[in-house]
Amino acid sequence: QVQLVQSGGGLVQAGGSLRLSCTASGRAISVRPIGWYRQTPGNQREWVARIIPDGITDYAEYVNGRFAISRDGANNTATLQMNSLTSEDTAVYYCDAAPIMGDFRDYWGQGTQVTVAS
């Protein structure tokens, strides 16, 4: 079983930056695709970014070059650096360790609030 513990987030002014971290138990960060998602009240969780074990990254179109996902296998941590934040980025952000062969479960972090004041 994988445990994901998130840190970071908080309140920032529009145009500012925040960094979210997701620390995993075991080697999940290195061997699983790691994704970031976000959710606002009354809406479905939406995908933000993803990094796969070989280091390839992918982003939702609305990110538009403002965010960067990275991974530190030695510290079992994935990070989402968010820049040029707008009020539309306000949400609860979640990290996810995707299923792999032998363990077809998704594992989620506890969520962290990001609030961007306009």
Image: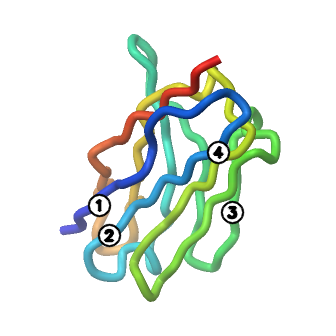
Question: Which quarter of the picture shows residue 92?
Answer: top left
Mark 4 or mark 1: whose residue is earlier in sequence: 1
Mark 4 or mark 3: whose residue is earlier in sequence: 4
Residue flagged by tag 4: what amino acid is it? Ser
Q: CA distance from mark 1 to mark 2?
A: 5 Å
**Quadrant where the image shows the N terminus:** bottom left
- Residue at 49 percent across and 41 percent down: it is 37
| Mark 3 vs 2: CB contact within 8 A | no
User: Tag 3's secondary structure?
Assistant: strand
Residue holding disc 3? 57
**Quadrant where the image shows the C terminus:** top right
User: Tag 2's secondary structure?
Assistant: strand
Residue holding disc 1? 4
Q: CA distance from mark 1 to mark 3?
A: 20 Å
Q: Left or right: 99 with respect to 20?
A: left
Q: Observer-nearest residue: 11 or 103?
A: 11
